[in-house]
Amino acid sequence: MATTVRLTPTPTYDKLTLGLTDTSTYDVVPASASVVITPPGFDAVTLAITPEGLNVFQSSDLEIVTLGDTEVELPDGVYIAVFTPLGEDPITIYFMRVEKIQEKFDAAFMKLDMTECDRAIKKQSKVELNTIYFFIQGAISSANNCAIIESNSLYATADRMLDSFIRNNCGCTGVNYLVNFI
């Protein structure tokens, strides 16, 4: 029997994998457990998992279409996992996967040449990136609290803002520096 049944989404920092860790505390560790995972936009799939362990899933495990023998990227969005250790009542968790948007955010951040921009542009770019990051974190928090509509809305807003930020070349052309300081 478990004293506490818990399943924790575990970051893999990889667009191809999803990690879930059984962080339950057991009097006697069960021989098996299962989880029903519903990825956004796909049907639920039941999978066996290792109790008290890290379990990593790919697109083929989640029955998301693969390209030949190649795994495909897992979608960002709200995932639902129903965890049932043997002999225990199931628990349901909601969580927002953000690996794709996080990679896009990281690329935008790395393109921002802090040494090329003048102070005002650098400051404005930092504010924009912080705002985008705030929306991403809001999407995660909303999903964790079962506010799925709000979570998806915050994610979509962050994605639009990030696309605009990238499209505008992060606001850093260096022209202001060249015109005013050289």
Image: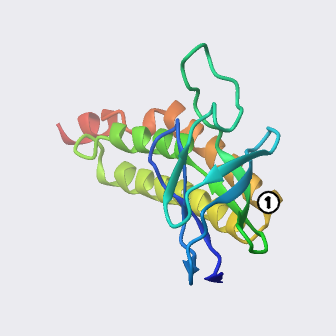
Quadrant where the N terminus sits is bottom right
Depth check, front residue: 157 or 35 = 35
Query: Which picture quadrant has residue 92?
Result: bottom right
Q: Amino acid at mark 1?
A: Ile
27 horizontally vs 87: left or right: left
At x 46%, y 49%, the residue is 12
Residue farthest to the top? 68
78 over 28 or under it: above or below: above
4 over 97 or under it: above or below: below
170 horizontally vs 43: left or right: left
Return the residue at label 1.
148
Answer yes or no: is residue 171 visible: no
Q: Position of residue 19 (x, y in %)?
A: 53, 52
Tally of numbered tags = 1
41 horizontally vs 105: left or right: right
Query: Which picture quadrant has residue 85?
Result: bottom right
Label 1 residue SS: helix
Q: Position of residue 17 (x, y in %)?
A: 53, 41
